[in-house]
Image: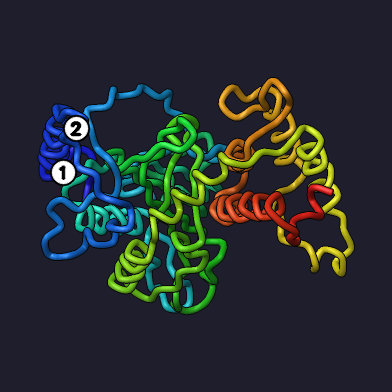
Amino acid sequence: MEYTDNTAVMELHSVQRSSLLNLEALDIQDAQVIYPSKINEIIEVEPVSVQPLLFSNRVKSEYIHKPFMGANTIQVEFNHLKNDCIIPVFSKDNEKTIAHQEFIDIVMNTALKMFPQQSISNPEIRVSHQIKGRTPDAIYKNAKDLLDHEKTVYYERMAFIIQIPSIVDTVNGNELALTLGGVRSYNLENLYNKKTFEKFKFFIGFQNKVCCNLCVSSDGFVEVMRVGSYHELQEKVTAVINNYNAESHLEDMKSLSQHHLTEHQFAQLIGKSRLYQHLPKSDKASIPCLNFNDSHINTMAKDYYEDKNFCRDEDGNIILWNVYNLFTQANKSSYIDTFLDRNLNAFQFSKGLQNSLNHTSDYNWFLS
């Protein structure tokens, strides 16, 4: 499926835009409230009014678009992956891998089927670790003399997200949109062997539209999705979407706004997080995992004072929702293959800090 220059998809988007206009024409008292626990019913035969959140004629907010991740990645279009990139193979049997664009295509098709009445964005794609090559007829040319048709390229790592901007909720004044996406890293495959199960990462969660940070929970993320075919990949993606509890995830995030760290506690957190990297293995084993390095922690310390959306208040206190977003903001500098794992760790760690404030927990070490 092409997501640009494709008549069928353009017509679909036209219908979606029309639906959005109809939604915006509703008065707030006529808006239909259907709770997030109903999200998994969208796959049923009659998904007519099944929507997980509140839709109304709210004023449309304009957000400055920011990449969902940075680091060493670049943004590319779907058609570039489809038309300009070669597809790696398993060298011992010459069997092709599931290409990046095929992974995106499968997720997009699944989203269109499971959310038929919703507005669905074109995929935002980030790639890194470009692998260059050349055609046989250019074997003796200098690199500077190569023509475009003599060059080959593919990307070792790819991450993408697909936002469903018509499914939203608000946490502490930040509008969140339901979002799906995935990661593919060829460096995790043994391409020098025969074809075997291939590995993918997939998630469904929310994206903070204020800062484009991703919010990932454990029931909406699969760290290693092993598949042997397109059909199996689609089945497993569908299963993750069905098992995802949007209501619970949203309630957990909203509860983070009800607790805060004092300036002293945040300073303890920053200092202990830096010490954590150098703990002996025996000591680290008894402490909850923190999958962030010194560079991430330095970014959090800087943003505690300077980030206009998630910094401290006038008294130096900072709510846990903001601490969580400092983590996910810092995570944008991670490489593609660790990006989603750290996003999940940020959520689990923030919930652990919340438990520590409520009662004794293993996370006390970071605040004491």
Q: Are marks 1 and 2 in contact (CB under 8 Å)?
A: no
Q: Position of residue 271 (x, y in %)?
A: 84, 42
Q: Where is residue 306 in the image (x, y as percent from the top left)?
A: 67, 22
User: In this view of the protein, can residue 256 be seen by the observer?
Assistant: yes
Q: Which residue is rendered at x = 76% and y = 38% of the image? A: 266
Asked if 335 appears above or below 14 in the picture, the reply is below
Front residue of this view, candidates 180 and 355:
355
Check disc 1: other Cα within 10 Å, few if <14, some if 14-19, many if 20+: some
Q: Which residue is rendered at x = 75% and y = 35% of the image? A: 262
Front residue of this view, candidates 251 and 45:
251
Q: Is mark 2 on a helix, strand or loop?
A: helix
Q: Is residue 289 left or right of residue 151?
A: right
Front residue of this view, candidates 15 and 258:
258
Q: In which quarter of the image is residue 348?
A: bottom right
Measured in 3D between alpha carbons, the distance from the residue under mark 1 to the one under mark 2, in whole angstroms, is 33 Å
Mark whose residue sits in front, 1 or 2? 2
Q: Position of residue 77 (x, y in %)?
A: 35, 39
Q: Is residue 337 left or right of residue 363?
A: left
Q: Which residue lies under the disc numbered 1?
A: 9
Asked if 312 appears above or below 352 in the picture, the reply is above
Q: Which residue is rendered at x = 16% and y = 47% of the image? A: 117
Asked if 106 appears above or below 14 in the picture, the reply is below
Q: Position of residue 259 (x, y in %)?
A: 63, 42
Q: Which residue lies under the disc numbered 2?
A: 29
Amino acid on which disc 1 is placed: Val
Q: In this view, does 222 lie to the left or right of 165?
A: right
